[in-house]
Image: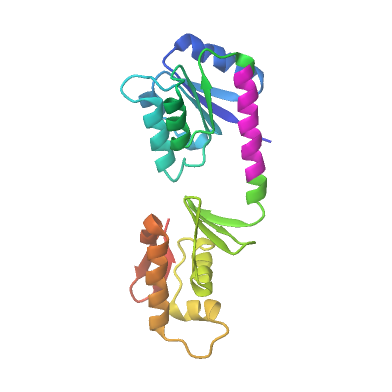
């Protein structure tokens, strides 16, 4: 099993060193950044957890967390705030942004390690559940066992045909399907289906999946595909 990787972002260099040493002692791979701006220059997709201070330079930890949550490639990364801003309003702000935990300074290293382990365990449990059978792209997810389509964590109502078209696309990204092939694969139980029926379903599908609607592209003279 590969080591879990953590990014510590705090403008207190001494604190970063202490956290890095103790987390590495626990077996984690740890990188540090002394500002949110520097942290955002990294490829955040490689991290299993972000430890963020709130009060830093021009970009606060809250602002960085919002950017992480708004990016489909990083929306799933857990975030723990480590900060001296410990009012109820601050905590609510952190959790509303999407924090997985919020630890007030000063704190004990043992407490931080315990909370890091707790968040990591939750994420591992979620991954095991997701292995049941999930097809996804960014924050668009199809739970095949339950025949559900989720967008940004919320279920979207789908007809059977819309569901089957989306599954066909997500399981075969970048592949172009002709109308005849889509009719054969999706409308197997119907005798007569017009090409227009496919176009109507594609239009509805694009609207339902929000920003990912643009990924369903038309190849004139050939058909449709879900383009990454």
Is 12 drawn above or below residue 95 in the view shown?
A: above
Q: Quadrant of the C terminus?
A: bottom left
- In magenta, the rendered stretch is 111-126
* Farthest residue, direction front: 88
Q: Position of residue 211 (x, y in %)?
A: 37, 55
Left or right of 30, for residue 110: right
Measuring 49% from the left and 76% from the top, which residue is drawn there? 182
Main SS of residues in magenta: helix
Camera-side residue: 81 or 6? 81
Q: Position of residue 153 (x, y in %)?
A: 50, 50
- Count the marks: 0
Kindly tell me whether residue 41 is visible in this rendering: no
Is 172 drawn above or below residue 179 in the view shown?
A: above
Measuring 61% from the left and 62% from the top, which residue is drawn there? 144
* Farthest residue, direction top: 14
Measuring 58% from the left and 84% from the top, which residue is drawn there? 189
Camera-side residue: 168 or 55? 55
Is 145 drawn above or below residue 19 in the view shown?
A: below
* Farthest residue, direction bottom: 191
Kindly tell me whether residue 121 is visible in this rendering: yes
Camera-side residue: 126 or 13? 126
Q: How is the image coloured?
A: rainbow
Q: Quadrant of the N terminus?
A: top right
Task: Inspect the magenta stretch and tell me whether residue 227 lies in it.
Answer: no
Left or right of 55, for residue 120: right
* Farthest residue, direction left: 58
Task: Inspect the magenta stretch and tell me whether residue 125 lies in it.
Answer: yes
Is 69 drawn above or below residue 227 in the view shown?
A: above
Residue 87, picture quadrant? top left
């Amino acid at each position: 099993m590969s080591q879990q990787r953590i990014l510590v972002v705090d403008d207190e260099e001494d604190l970063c060193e202490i956290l890095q040493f103790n987390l590495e002692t626990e077996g984690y791979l740890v990188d540090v950044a002394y500002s949110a701006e520097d942290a955002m220059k990294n490829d955040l997709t490689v991290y299993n957890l972000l430890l963020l201070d709130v009060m830093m330079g021009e970009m606060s930890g809250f602002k960085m967390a919002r950017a992480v949550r708004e990016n489909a490639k990083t929306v799933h990364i857990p975030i723990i705030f480590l900060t001296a801003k410990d009012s109820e309003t601050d905590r609510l702000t952190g959790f509303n942004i999407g924090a997985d935990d919020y630890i007030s300074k000063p704190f004990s290293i043992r407490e931080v390690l315990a909370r890091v382990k707790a968040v990591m365990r939750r994420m591992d449990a979620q991954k095991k559940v997701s292995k049941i059978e999930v097809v996804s792209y960014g924050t668009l997810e199809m739970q095949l066992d339950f025949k559900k389509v989720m967008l940004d964590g919320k279920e979207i109502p789908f007809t059977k045909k819309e569901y089957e078209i989306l599954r066909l696309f997500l399981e075969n990204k970048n592949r172009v399907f002709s109308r005849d092939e889509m009719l054969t694969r999706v409308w197997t139980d119907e005798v007569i289906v017009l090409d227009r029926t496919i176009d109507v379903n594609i239009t509805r599908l694009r609207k339902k999946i929000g920003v990912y609607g643009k990924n369903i592209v038309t190849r004139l003279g050939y058909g449709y595909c879900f383009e990454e």
